[in-house]
Amino acid sequence: MELLLVDQDAPDPDAIARAAAQLRNGRLVAFPTETVYGLGANALDPSAVARIYRAKGRPSNNPLIVHVADVAGARRIVAEWPRIAEQLAARWWPGPLTIVLEKNASIPNSVTAGLTKVGVRVPAHPVALALLRAAGVPIAAPSANRANAVSPTTAQHVQNSLPDADVLVLDGGRCEVGIESTVLDLSGPVPTMLRPGGVSQAEIEHELGMPIRRVEASDDGDAGRPAPGMSKKHYAPRAKLVRIPHGDVGAMARAIDDARRAGELVAALAIGESVCAAAAPAACVAMPDDPHGYARWLYAELHAMDDRGMTRIVVEDVPPGTAWDGVRDRLARASA
Ligand code: AMP
Ligand code: MG
C-alpha cells in the first residue's frame, strides 16, 4: 500500500497520471469520492476486477458499482439509456445516485456478480473525476474496506482496513456525504430503490412527480433478494451496536448502565447533548441533528470507537422520515 497526498480541489496532474496508469495496467487504486473511498479497478478488465474481490475478501455474488466521468460514459456501458435515467442524471450527477440498468457486453460478468444489470454513477469529487478522465476507462469501485466492515471516509481508514493490499491510495481528505450512494433500479416499469443513501426517496419522487418502490434489505438468502449485496448485516463495526428508539433518554441511560455493569466498554452515539449528560458512558458522541451532518460523521465515529477498543455502542435511533433513510439503514445493518 502506498499513500499519495493530493489536493482535494485541484489534484496534482502528475499524481493523477500515475494513478491512471496504474489502473490501465490492471492494478488497484483507492480514491476519494463524495460518498466514501472507493477501491477502483478498470471495469473493462476481468483480471483487474478480480483483484478487488480478493483484496476485500468480498463474496463474488456482491456486484460492484461502475464509476464514469459523465453521462456519455454511462451510455457506453448500458444496453439502453431511458429518458428517466437522463432526467435523474441531469438532476443528480455528479452525485450520490447510482442508476441500475441492463448492461451491454463491454462490462464483464464479474463486475455485476453475474447479473444482467449494472450499477453506474458519476461521483462528485474532483479527485475521482480527474482520475476517471485521465484513465479513460470506467472504474469499478466498491468501498475500500474489508468486506462487511465499516466503509472508509478518510485515507487513513483505507490504510487501517486494507493494510496488506497492493494498492495506490489517493488521499484527498474527508468524504463530504459520508455514507454510500442511493441505488435506484431504472430497468423496469417502476423505479425501485435498492439501497437508500445520499439522495432520499422523497427527493427522487419529487423530481419524478410519481411514487417509486422501495426494497428492504433482508435475511432471506440470495433467492429472496431482488439484488445481491442487500443482506441485512453489513457495514458493521467490531463493537456490538444496539439501537434505542429516538428520544428515549431513559432507555439510553439504562442500556448504557446495563452494558457497563456487564463489563462492556460502552460508547454512546446520541442526537444532541442530553443523553451524554444523563448516562455518562465511557465515550459519548453528540451527533448532528440533521441527516446530512449525521451521515458525514457516522462512519468516522464508528471507526474511532473501534480504534478505542469500545465493545458496545449504544445508539439513539434517528427520527422518522425518508430524509433519514440512508442513515437509518446503515444503523440497522450495523446492529443486525
Ligand atoms: P459498495 O460495496 O458500497 O460499493 O456497494 C455496492 C452495492 O451496490 C452492492 O452491494 C449492491 O447493493 C449495489 N449494486 C451494485 N451493482 C448493482 C447491480 N447491478 N444491481 C443491483 N444492485 C447493485
Ligand atoms: Mg461496501
Image (cartoon, rainbow, N blue to C red):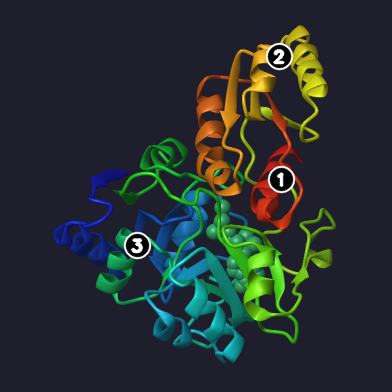
Task: Determine which residue is flagged by label 3.
Answer: 128
CA neighbours of label 2 inside 10 A, class few (<14), some (14 to 19), many (20+):
few
Q: Nearer the viewer, mark 2 or mark 1?
A: 2
Of labels 2 and 1, earlier in sequence is: 2
Task: Determine which residue is flagged by label 2.
Answer: 278
CA neighbours of label 3 inside 10 A, class few (<14), some (14 to 19), many (20+):
many
CA neighbours of label 1 inside 10 A, class few (<14), some (14 to 19), many (20+):
many
Q: Is residue 267 above or below residue 159?
A: above
Quadrant for residue 240, please give it: top right
125 sits to left or right of 180: left
Q: Is mark 1 within 8 Å of ligand 2?
A: no
Marks 2 and 1, how far apart in space?
A: 27 Å
Q: Position of residue 258 (x, y in %)?
A: 80, 13
Of labels 2 and 3, earlier in sequence is: 3
Q: Position of residue 121 (x, y in %)?
A: 49, 71
Of labels 1 and 3, earlier in sequence is: 3
Marks 2 and 3, how far apart in space?
A: 43 Å
Task: Determine which residue is flagged by label 1.
Answer: 333
Q: Position of residue 335 (x, y in %)?
A: 73, 37
Mark 1 and 3 residues: CB-CB less than 8 Å, in contact?
Answer: no
Quadrant for residue 208, please give it: bottom right
Mark 2 and 1 residues: CB-CB less than 8 Å, in contact?
Answer: no
Q: Is residue 246 above or below residue 321?
A: above
The residue nearer to you, when weighing 180 against 46, is 180
Three-letter amino acid code at the position of disc 3: Ala
The residue nearer to you, when weighing 171 against 221, is 171
Q: Is residue 48 above or below residue 99?
A: above
Q: Nearer the viewer, mark 2 or mark 3?
A: 2
Q: Secondary structure at mark 3?
A: helix
Asked whether residue 60 appears in the rendered view, the answer is no
> What residue do we see at 76% from left, 41% from top?
336
3 sits to left or right of 309: left
